[in-house]
Amino acid sequence: MSIEVSGGRRGLTDPVLSAEIMAAIPDQPLETQRKMNYFMTPRGKRINEYEVLCCYTQPTPDWIPGGLDWGDWTQKFHGGRPSWSNESTEMRCSDWLKHRDPAFRWHALYVKDKAEEWRYTDRFLKAYSADGHVRSMDPVWRDEVLGDYLGAFGFSEYGLFNSHSSVVRDCLGDTLRMSSAMIGLDKVDNAQMIQMERTFLAKLVPGFPESTDIPKNEWTKGAIFKGSREVVQQIWQETYDWNEILFSGHMVYDPLFGQFVRREFFARLSSYYGDSLTPFFINQMQLYFSQTKGITTDMFHTCLAADEQFGAYNTRLMHAWADKWLPRTLTALKDFMGIFSKIPEIKGVSDKPAIEAALHRVFDDWKHDFADPIGYQVNTAVLIKTVLSGLK
Amino acid sequence: MAISAATKAATDALAVNRAPVSVGAQEVHRWMQSFTWDFEKNRTKYSTKYKMANDTKEQFKLIAKEYARMESVKDERQFGSLQDVLTRVDAANRVHPKWNESMKVISNFLEVGEYNAIAATGMLWDSATAPEQKNGYLGQVLDEIRHTNQCGYINYYFAKQGQDAAGHNDARRTRAIGPLWKGMKRVFSDGFISGDAVECSINLQLVGEACFTNPLIVAVTEWASANGDEMTPTVFLSIETDELRHMANGYQTVVSIANDAAASKYLNTDLNNAFWTQQKYFTPVLGMMFEYGSHFKVEPWVKTWNRWVYEDWGGIWIGRLGKYGVQSPASLRDAKKDAYWAHHDLFMIAYALWPTGFFRLSLPTAEEAEWYEANYPGWYDMYGKVYDEWRARGCEDPNSGFLPLQWFIENNHPIYIDRVSQVPFCPSYCKGASSLRVLEFNGKKHSFSDQWGERMWLSEPERYECQNIFEQYEGRELSDVIAEGHGLRSDGKTLISQPHTNKNGKLWTLDDIKKINCVFNDPLKAL
């Protein structure tokens, strides 16, 4: 027979082709080691599917710790800067490929989760609208807080999203690159969910402004988000070290400012103003926050602070970065305190003691989850006092 | 609580219509362009000589959640096929052995391209100023993660279920030993991520994806299927559905710079360099993998190349960009010549260096030789008779003590590596257009095989300093190099690579190689 086949004949199903193929196949498999990436050290007892599909996809030479390749880059930037280099960060690591997403999410698992959230969001919005929940929402809360300030907070999420672009380009590890892209996508998802809520409200409440003009004006010119806008801009565009971008955004700014705004302001207060819509979206954001925390604490605590060779140095550097970004984040929170003068006060909910209690929850969580593991000393009472000085 | 006029209106509206309301993806996306804001230091961290327009739109208007829904549906179909019906029919053990070996290379090397494209599109996401354009690149970042995982899944599947797991199971560690790796890194890795951001986009999206993914990801499925492999079409065609959006991203990159004065000065030069960079490797390597890595042939590579590269890309796709001043690359004519013979030249060298691979290579059978001669007249006199000689000297038999590399040495046909493309060539024994050019810079000699690469090096030698395998391995004995690169099977002595796929043939061991005492030399030192 001719070895040139045409007409879409398939070797698996065409009897003639199949017979010839089967005759050429060894009687026994030639290799008994069937586990892909068998040479690697798994995070758990066995190599899991995430590790099979993600680990060692990064083709870096062995002079970038963890790499399996050799030699130089085959093409460099104009002027000779290398494709990837140890100098792209002040952090040091004995294995840049060590990071693992604690949830072991490769792409298929990540999009499956988010696709389910999208389907459920659609079902929820339909039920919410048909049920007429919107009638119970406090108009000031709805028109000013959700219309203006929630919209403005979307820009914080969008700016943080953009801070991941250079991390995705520059970071030195495969699993970290994938994690960074996913947590970046979660941030733009947050910004989009905020706009989705505003569009939804505009459909239900005639006259509710769907446009981003007012929130953008609040974000760029208003006093409440002045400090946060400046921090976000600094993380996004003034910080070149990809580890510092992740640290400042996800280990300082978002666990403090983001947590207070999302959890302690919008999610906590909304129910008191008859708003059961906002917590639906905020809870998705909080899920992403939780997943992101798992990723970034794995990187900064498990991989970098605990690195046998460079752990002590990395920890000192993290302290220096915390010293740099914490005061800026405090300013952001202090400015945000101005928002409480814009809403009708509810005793025990939005008065000073309640705000102080909320701040305690956020700062105590941060101390426990982020500062203590790297031995970073903070006096939360002093920090909270600084923030509270912004109350009008 | 006072009821505002708006609340009353909402209440009234509800009284009239209680139909459920939701928000579609497009209703969110239409606000995306307004998500950014101006501030003093808002600029990219990656320099480009072009200016991307602030109002550039994207063609595929996705939001994060809709993106996830779309990809998840495709994943369900793809992994359902792989894990259900293909596994039940034992499909991985019904693939022709030659093709099983080709997929060790194709899938892993494509994985490298996809992986680097994550970083490349991260850079473009940073470089673009328009939120919609950023969003288009962001979608691609996620796609490239998907494709990296998918390519890995092919090797994973073949390793777990197929006839020869070696090479599939450790390609990420063993791929760096042989002569095809560095060239692959140039096109699929560094060419995508190191340079002017727009130049990288042209490499990745305008050439790599719009031009070469058609033969690499689409045409390959026909070859796979003919040779019994239904796993590759299942995965690669799912990958290709995303590639359309990536081509659109490349198109939008050009649209975004179309009105920039720099475009009229530099765009066609960058396109020509990118095309030559990509074709210099893909034209011979894809042709080699298809024709020499298969038993059943679909059509001569030169026909595939002409259809996808010359007519579809060089004519139609570039033609569509003509209104933006884009012209077909000047090097397209030279590339067309390469499409006829370059893959035959490369196979000869790859086979001569077979012990450095992570896959088994086979010399053409008699019926395959007839097919080559019929489609490439003159093939036998140049290549076929040499293969007959190698076979007669026992190149497939571990007891022969003969490596085809010796034939090149005995006949004074030195093999060089092109500094810019890192592709090996033998100027004294080839039918392709390679010609030896040697230049000296900073006390080091550099060889080149064509004028286009030489021009790139002459204008920016600091970008192409990478050692080649002969410089790296100089003075070292072959079995040492293989052992250090982990080129052994799990028994610790048999090579992963072999010079045949004959099921009754003996397998070479490290000792067989050691006995030959083959020591690497840098051919440039002899000049």
Image (cartoon, rainbow, N blue to C red):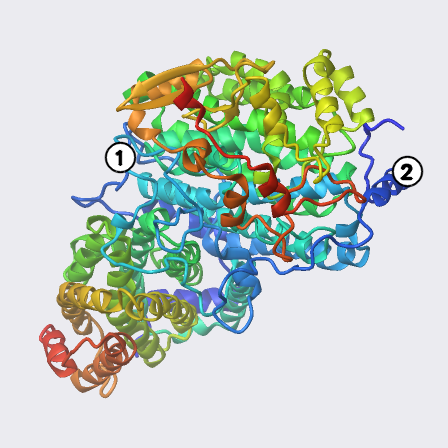
> As drawn, is B472 to the left or to the right of B374?
left
- Secondary structure beneath disc 1? loop
Return the chain for callout 1. B
Give the distance between the C-alpha atoms of the residues marked 1 and 2, in whole angstroms: 57 Å
Query: Badge 1: how crowded within 10 Å, few (<14), some, or many (20+)?
Result: some
Label at residue B91: none
Between B443 and A175, the one lying in front of the other is B443
Instruction: Name the residue carrying label 1.
Output: B47
Give the SS element for disc 2. helix
- Seen at 46% across and 54% down, the residue is B64
A25, above or below B410, in the image? below
Q: Amino acid at mark 2?
A: Val
- The amino acid marked with disc number 1 is Ser
Residue B357 visible here = no
**Which quarter of the figure is the C terminus of chain A placed in?**
bottom left
Whether residue B383 can be seen here: yes
- Above/below status of B238 relative to B304: below
| Mark count | 2
Residue A112 is situated, as x and y percent measured from the top left of the image, at: 56, 61
Where residue B386 appears, x then y in whole percent? 69, 20
- On screen, residue A287 versus residue B306, left or right, reads left
Q: Which quadrant of the figure contains the N terminus of chain A?
A: top right
Name the residue beneath numbered marker 2. A16
Mark 2 nearby-residue class (10 Å; few <14, some 14–19, many ≥20): few
Can you tell which of label 1 and label 2 is closer to the viewer? 2
Quick one: B265 or B303, which is closer to the camera?
Answer: B303
Which picture quadrant has residue B134?
Answer: top left
